[in-house]
Image (spheres, helix red, strand yellow):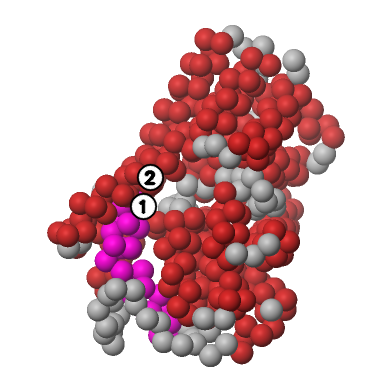
């Protein structure tokens, strides 16, 4: 069967199974890998070998990073340090909607999971505003803020596979020098969007943030709560300038430094349960991503990139290919990390990579991963449950803002490609 047709059938069935059965993405993606391999003419043996290789490749890339992020998150949560971090932010930012968006934005990167950051912020944002409608606006902003940084800032599990596949030796500092200001501008635009559709939120008078089962906060900065993140940042110049580590070694090394710092500073009463809960949570995330790696590896092994991408480039401009491919994969299975892993596998070595500069190429895929955050997106249902809103309201406050963010990123990426990089000598 034509690989493009096999790909469309596989994506459609993954979508149906995800919606109908709501089972773990790992099993739907592994099943999709088997189906695609057989439809594309691969033998069962070569398909299964591809699945094993894809799982191993992704686990080696993300295992340490995600485990460290999950351990940091659980230890901070067990000691009520997240409340302290939000309280510190509130000393400098007085507007609750901005606090919510910035908190989600900041926590998603070092914790390596925007959903985990949202879950941790949920009870704290509940205490900022007792009115249900206004409280829900804060929850939506925390979710959208977390997704924006998660999709754009290195190092997150979304950006890492894209950077490793397409960077071409570009420094991660150079990438973040563009992506961080861009992500903050997009976040600012989202805040304006919410101000337009919910004008009453700007009139909110912030109340004091009560901590949950924790001591009365002191006047200064809660340095103990920020310590793991400070350690991660401090380890970056040491890894690059003194130890001369490669990018892969550096990102794993600095996350280990952050996790060790969190473990060392944790009280004995929370250290063991925090490690156990963090490892369990990390396992769920890692295996879902490994399923994506399996599907991506089998797709590449089938020759899809050479055949199907060649067909696509005849139908649409090549600048649209990474954006549309990422949007289709995101629509099918709902995970931005899975989208990044599969898209990177499919596009690596294709004509698309040589035709588009690495920086806008990465941004185009990130933009595509934001376009359709709907029923296949597990975050969509988590936000719906925590807000208690109907589907139409969640679409207006979650799906649409993220799509607008994706469109904004897409416009910037296309402008950079045509106005900046194609004019370079």
Quick one: SS at disc 1? helix
From the viewer's perspective, is 27 left or right of 391? Answer: left
Q: Considering the whole magenta stretch, tell me its main secondary structure.
A: helix
Magenta stretch bounds: 70-92
Is residue 68 shown to the viewer in this render?
A: no
Foreground pick, 348 / 371:
371
Above or below residue 357? Residue 20 is above
Q: Residue 245 sits in which quadrant? A: top left
Check disc 2: other Cα within 10 Å, few if <14, some if 14-19, many if 20+: many
Q: Are marks 1 and 2 in contact (CB under 8 Å)?
A: yes
Q: Residue 390, percent across and down?
A: 68, 62
Q: Residue 393, percent across and down?
A: 70, 65
Labelled disc at residue 410: none
Q: Which one is closest to the eye, mark 1 or mark 2?
A: 2
Q: Earlier in the sequence, mark 1 or mark 2?
A: 1
Is residue 84 magenta-colored? yes
Q: What is the count of numbered marks?
A: 2
Q: Which residue is mark 1?
A: 69
Q: Marks 1/2: CA distance?
A: 8 Å
From the viewer's perspective, is 8 left or right of 142? Answer: right
Q: Which residue is mark 2?
A: 282
């Amino acid at each position: 069967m034509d690989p493009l047709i096999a790909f469309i059938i596989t994506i459609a069935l993954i979508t149906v199974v995800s919606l109908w059965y709501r089972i773990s993405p790992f099993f739907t993606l592994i099943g999709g890998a088997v189906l695609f391999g057989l439809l594309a003419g691969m033998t069962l043996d070569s398909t299964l070998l591809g699945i094993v290789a894809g799982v191993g490749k992704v686990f080696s890339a993300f295992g340490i990073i995600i485990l460290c992020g999950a351990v940091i998150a659980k230890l901070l949560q067990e000691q009520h340090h997240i409340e302290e971090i939000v309280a510190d932010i509130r000393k400098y930012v007085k507007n609750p909607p901005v606090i919510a968006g910035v908190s989600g934005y900041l926590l998603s990167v070092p914790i390596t999971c925007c959903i985990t950051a949202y879950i941790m912020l949920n009870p704290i944002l509940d205490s900022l505003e007792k009115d249900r409608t206004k409280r829900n606006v804060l929850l939506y902003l925390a979710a959208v803020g977390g997704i924006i940084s998660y999709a754009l800032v290195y190092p997150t599990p979304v950006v890492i596979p894209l950077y490793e596949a397409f960077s071409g030796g570009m420094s991660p500092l150079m990438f973040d020098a563009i992506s961080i200001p861009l992500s903050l501008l997009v976040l600012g635009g989202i805040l304006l969007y919410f101000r337009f559709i919910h004008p009453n939120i700007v009139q909110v008078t912030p109340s004091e943030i009560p901590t949950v089962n924790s001591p009365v906060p002191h006047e200064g900065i809660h340095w103990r709560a920020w310590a793991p993140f400070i350690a991660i940042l401090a380890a970056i110049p040491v890894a690059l300038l003194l130890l001369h580590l490669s990018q892969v070694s550096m990102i794993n090394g600095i996350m280990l430094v952050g996790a060790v710092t969190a473990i060392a500073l944790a009280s004995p009463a929370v250290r063991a349960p925090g490690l156990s809960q963090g490892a369990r949570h990390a396992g769920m995330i890692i295996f879902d991503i490994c399923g994506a790696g399996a599907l991506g590896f089998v797709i590449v092994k089938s020759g899809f990139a050479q055949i199907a991408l060649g067909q696509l480039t005849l139908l649409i401009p090549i600048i649209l290919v990474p954006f549309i491919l990422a949007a289709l994969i995101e629509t099918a299975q709902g995970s931005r990390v899975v989208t990044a892993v599969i898209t990177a596998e499919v596009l690596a070595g294709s004509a698309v990579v040589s035709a588009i500069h690495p920086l806008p190429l990465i941004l185009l895929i990130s933009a595509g991963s934001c376009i359709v955050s709907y029923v296949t997106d597990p975050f969509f249902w988590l936000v719906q449950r925590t807000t208690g809103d109907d589907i139409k309201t969640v679409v207006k406050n979650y799906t649409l803002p993220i799509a607008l963010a994706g469109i904004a990123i897409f416009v910037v990426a296309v402008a950079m490609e045509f106005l900046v990089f194609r004019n370079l000598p």
